[in-house]
Image (cartoon, rainbow, N blue to C red):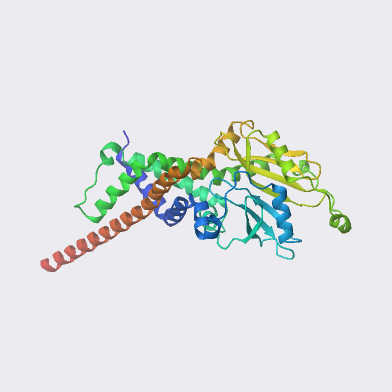
Amino acid sequence: MTSQRILNRLFTLHSWAGIVTGLLLFIVCFSGAVVVFKNEIDLWANPSLAQLPRSDKPASLDAVMVQLHTRYPGATVETIALPDAVNPSYFAFVRERGAPASTRTKVAMRSDTGTVVGPVDSQLGQTLRMLHVFLFFGPRWIVGFLGAAMLVLIATGIVIHRKILAELFTQRWGRSFRVVMSDLHKSAGIWGLGFHILIAATGAWMGLAPLFEQGYKYVTTSAAAAAPKPARKAANEAAEPVPMQSLDALYATAQQAVPGLEARYVSLRRWGTSTAEAGFTGSLSGHLASTARVDINATNGVPKKVHDPRTAGFWSLVNGLMEPLHFGDFGGLALKWLYFFLGMTPAFLSISGTLIWLDARQQRRREAEAAQGASASGVATVA
């Protein structure tokens, strides 16, 4: 049996943790609920893209590259996004000649022919994702910390409100504002408890696991063991074009290395040079994990790095499950709507918790003022 003293301390921890992180939690939870429709939002914001034809047999990656180089001669193609269940088109991120390294143009292409349609006018969905994952410009560990804070709020809330079944259906509409909000706060937290634990745990994992992994590598890897950097080539040698392997042949090699790989993105690094690489990242057919990746030497077609979460060990498999479980992008439109409505409840909890705390603080202030007034009145009467 938890003592009243411990309950009071947990209530204080619960209250202050909610107040300190309330605004950021609201931003992250609200944007996260909306961002499950990231691709749909991008299509809505660009109506012309939704009208493009969907092809059962999309154009080859090589045809897409030819079209891009024809439309943007001299430009660097950094990433190609393949058509999927929502987006009917190819997309590419292109850095035009002379543009800063941070400036990229998102270009849409027809999936049936690879013909360039033009730059994408709006990236509203991607903007919302940046807000949710990075708070625009912050490191990802901040959002991971908010996930950990949300777990603390859940754990302390469970201990504080031990009569879960009784409070599940308790709603006293005719009482004061604080009582009504408190009942709504508790019932919303209980009804969505399982989902809240899932979202908080996966969010904390994705935000903080890379931080701990980097710290572990830093501690365990000595400076002496670091691989020497390759010598820089002469300018005239670097400028000489080097023949590249076919992107379609490289994709076939990636699928041989990781059976069932369904690439979502193709990243091109140092394309046209002797150290060029093509990275194929995506999900696995018939599997929930979404972090399969194959990096291939683009000059000779030999895989350099293969990551198959099914065979890379337990923790790698767990890591591969985190993103689909967090964003709900594996069960179609119905699951997205479920994630949207349940994802709104943490945002409501952050607002209602703050309002309850503010109302309680005002109530204590009024009681203190009333007590002072009664004390002053009593002194005056005696005098």
Give the vertical position of 229 relative to 47 (above or below).
Answer: above
- Measured as percent of width and height from the top left, residue 185 is found at 32, 48
Q: Is residue 353 visible?
A: yes
Q: Is residue 4 left or right of residue 119?
A: left
- At 18% from the left and 66% from the top, the residue drawn is 376
Q: Is residue 22 left or right of residue 123?
A: left
Near-viewer residue (96 or 199): 96
Near-viewer residue (18 or 210): 210
Near-viewer residue (187 or 32): 32
Quarter occupied by the C terminus:
bottom left
- Measured as percent of width and height from the top left, residue 330 is found at 51, 40
Task: Kindly indicate the quadrant of the structure image that contains residue 161.
Answer: top left
Task: Kindly indicate the quadrant of the structure image that contains residue 261.
Answer: top right
Give the vertical position of 155 relative to 372 (above or below).
Answer: above
Quarter occupied by the N terminus:
top left
Near-viewer residue (46 or 124): 46
Q: Is residue 125 visible?
A: no
- At 69% from the left and 46% from the top, the residue drawn is 60
Number of marks present in the image shown: 0
- Measured as percent of width and height from the top left, residue 62 is found at 72, 48
- Measured as percent of width and height from the top left, residue 15 is found at 36, 50
